[in-house]
Image (cartoon, helix red, strand yellow):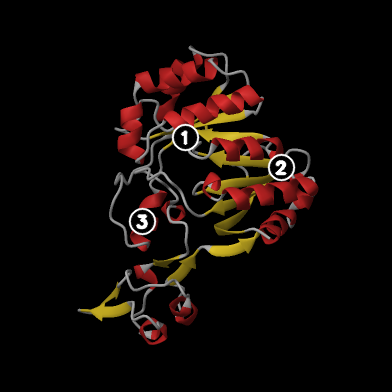
Amino acid sequence: METGILFNVQRFSVHDGPGIRTTLFFKGCPLRCQWCHNPEGYRARPELSFQAAKCIGCGACLAACPSGAHTSQQGAHVILRERCTACGACAAACPTGALAILGQTYTAQQAADAAARDMPFYGEEGGATFSGGEPLAQPEFALAVARLLQERGISLCIETSGYGSPQTLREIAPYTRLFLFDIKETDAQRHQAFTGVDNALILDNFRMLDNMGAKTLLRCPVIPGVNDREAHFAAIAALANTARHVTGIELEPYHPLGLSKREQLGRQDGYALRTSLAREALEPYRAQMQALTDVPVSIS
């Protein structure tokens, strides 16, 4: 049985595809988007999260850790992350929940069972959604879970950056009702600068899926000072116009939820804007795009 790592199972999701859905968050992603709201999905292994505001300085973690990854320096709790093996001993000993291990190993059967628990709530529209991280980064596991979901009659949506093996996409597409396909930046050089990878493979995979008849919803995060450019929005509309199976375009306003997560993981890199972008600010972009395409454009 294939195994993989999930960092969350979110129930009653209403923004991850049609209807009520259970979202399985896959750990591991080849992109490093500077504004990522799920930075705990970067690494393809379990890792330790620390919420300093919950720490009472009791020292239970220092006593429990077999690797000496916890220490106190001038009264402050310091984690020596190069020593941490994510064994979970410190999290188990912590009385306040300040420490947690993000990422748990599942068999494909266990992951499918987690989604099947909510079948009474799915109705005709709902189902399961793969998100992340990047589901395509765990191809064998994702495909195994997709097959099990189909056997149970659970519809599947996949949220993806599109950066993955074309073969994986070809294999998983028949099990997928809808791809929630991220278009983060249409300019190749800017995409490389802000996500760490080129977008050629992403666009090739999008075209391949469309040629296969797979339905896609283009999801486009709007990040102030990064991709809030008229040329970018025009390029998204043009991309949709080249396709036959795009069901819609969603503009997603930036929010800073990833900042606190990065801090809890001991990272200080990335986009640092702490103010959410109001939905109303995206209306001019939506109107601009709608004037260029017959594909419905909305703000999520």
Label 3 sits on residue: 262
| Residue 126 - label | 2
Residue drawn at (71%, 59%), measured in percent from left and top? 109
- The type of residue carrying mark 2 is Gly
Return the x and y of residue 106 as percentages of the image width and height. 62, 62
| In front of the other: 164 or 99 | 164
Residue 284 falls in image quadrant: top left
Which of marks 2 and 3 precedes in the sequence? 2
- The type of residue carrying mark 3 is Arg
Residue 32 falls in image quadrant: top left
| In front of the other: 240 or 99 | 240
Label 1 sits on residue: 252
Q: CA distance from mark 3 to mark 2?
A: 31 Å
| Residue 274 - label | none
For the image, the number of numbered tags is 3
| In front of the other: 204 or 125 | 204
Which of marks 1 and 2 precedes in the sequence? 2
Return the x and y of residue 261 as percentages of the image width and height. 39, 57
Element at badge 2?
A: loop
Residue 289: in sight, yes or no?
Answer: yes
Q: CA distance from mark 2 to mark 1?
A: 21 Å
Left or right relative to 81: residue 4: right
Identify the residue at the far bottom of this view: 63
Q: Nearer the viewer, mark 3 or mark 1?
A: 3
Rendered view: 107 above or below 205: below
- The type of residue carrying mark 1 is Glu
**Label 2 crowding class (10 Å Cα cut-off): few <14, some 14-19, many 20+?**
many
Return the x and y of residue 202 as percentages of the image width and height. 47, 32
Residue 246: in sight, yes or no?
Answer: no
